[in-house]
Image (cartoon, rainbow, N blue to C red):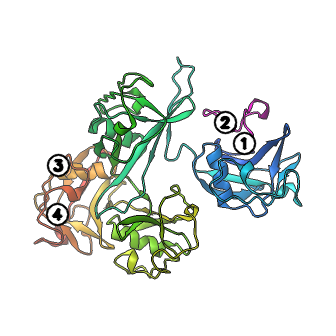
Amino acid sequence: MVRACELTQIVPPNRTEMPVNTLFEGRGSHRCEGRLEVLHDGVWGTVCDDDWDLVDANVVCRQLDCGLAMHWATSSRFGQGSGPILLDNVVCQGGETELGQCGSQGWGVHNCYHYEDVAVICRGVMIPSILYKMNPNSNSPPPLLQVTAPSGWWGVGTPARAVWRLYYRGSWGTVCDDDWDLTNAQVVCRQVGCGPAVSAHQNSYFGNGRGEILLDNVNCSGSEAMLERCYSLGWGVNNCGHHEDAGVVCVGKHLHWALTVQYRNVWGTVCDDDWGMLNAQVVCRQLGCGPAVEAKGTGFYGYGAGPIWLDNVDCTGAEADLASCFHLGWGQHNCGHHEDAGVICARSVRLVDGLHHCEGRVEMFSRGAWGTVCDDAWDIQDAQVVCNQVGCGQAMEARPQAYFGPGAGIILLDNLKCDGGEALLQFCSHIGWDVHNCDHTEDAGVTCSKS
């Protein structure tokens, strides 16, 4: 049986205290990166990098409860090992629960030296999870909070949606939706760095979870730094089933997605063969989520299910939607779900030409370009929505008349009337996209508190 190393470890622990048969050693900065070592017949040894790839690395990261693999490297990154080289030519299919289930030359059979020792960097439970501080009066391991964006092809302007779970005493669990509301969701979204909450969801809106239901009747004031500081019935005390699992929708800073598309009313994934930034730009623009930040592959956001609909997608970057790009044809591929593609899109609002990152001219991203907002009816409630959306605290000033200088491009919105509680600026009342009687001498700006 494999268990992860102690959750509170920052540097690799002493081997003799490790109740595991796979671990990371060397100069890693956290427990989910380092030189890979395995235990066989009571002896620790290394793994050679012949045929090693991200599919193999993902098996290791999953085995050690460290999320998904980001990179793999040779021993030069974390130092060479010593002792036997136990595995070589490891070939995993991606579905194995531990490295020993993958193909190899056999224990101790290799043609390698320690300068070929494999090292792995996993995303780890710290990204996007948040490690709670240990309660000094408790002997229990610290809980972890994880928010994961499920696969989905969502409409223009919609924020990042998330199902979330907790880690406590060695296993993942969910939170019951009794008394679940937007104030609780605000604590979750802030804790995982995903901006303000848009909505709180009940009745297993994102699907039934599994494992223990860890919290029930959560009641936050909204100012708590982490969910465990909110009132609840206590760890593991509940009267719920998984059909009552709680969920949240956060605005997000960057929007991270595993990519799924719908064809003939069936959702499926996109293979990462030839997947690149031009493809990601088309996706982000189609979703109204700003410019693409990064194109992800190798199942970076988890392995999807169902059909793989598209492969070898090759966009020029100008297409209105992904289906207009070149591809092999619907359902034609040579891939597995360990090759599912993903994207990271930038936020859709930014502040420009201020003295710091929390003030400036308000600009929005729409249809592939940045544009401005007119100052007609611009007030502190409108400014507050912007400050919330960019994660900059309270609105101090609503700045009219191109206070931070005139912008360029199209003027996207005019006569905004926000009540201050909207999650996104486009959710406020306005007279319509691209409808205005303004010029850039009327560009709106804000000054936020920065905290």
Q: Quadrant of the C terminus?
A: top left
Residue 259 lies in the magenta stretch: no
Mark 2: few, some, or many residues within 10 Å (few <14, many ≥20)? many
Instruction: Verify CB contact (< 8 Å) between mark 1 and mark 2.
Output: yes
**Nearer the observer, 24 or 357:** 24
**Nearer the observer, 270 or 373:** 270
Disc 2 is placed on an element classified as loop
Earlier-in-chain disc, 1 versus 2: 2
Using the numbered discs, state the Cα–Cα distance from disc 3 to disc 2 in whole angstroms: 48 Å
- Residue designated by label 4: 401
Question: In the figure, 252 relative to 327: above or below?
Answer: above
Residue 451, can we see it? Answer: no
Q: Which mark is residue 381?
A: 3
- Residue designated by label 2: 5
Which residues, given as a range, are shown in magenta? 1-25
Q: Which one is closest to the eye, mark 1 or mark 4?
A: 1
The residue that appears at 58% across and 73% down in the rendered structure is: 334
Earlier-in-chain disc, 3 versus 1: 1
The residue that appears at 34% across and 78% down in the rendered structure is: 320
Disc 4 is placed on an element classified as loop
Question: In the figure, 141 relative to 303: above or below?
Answer: above
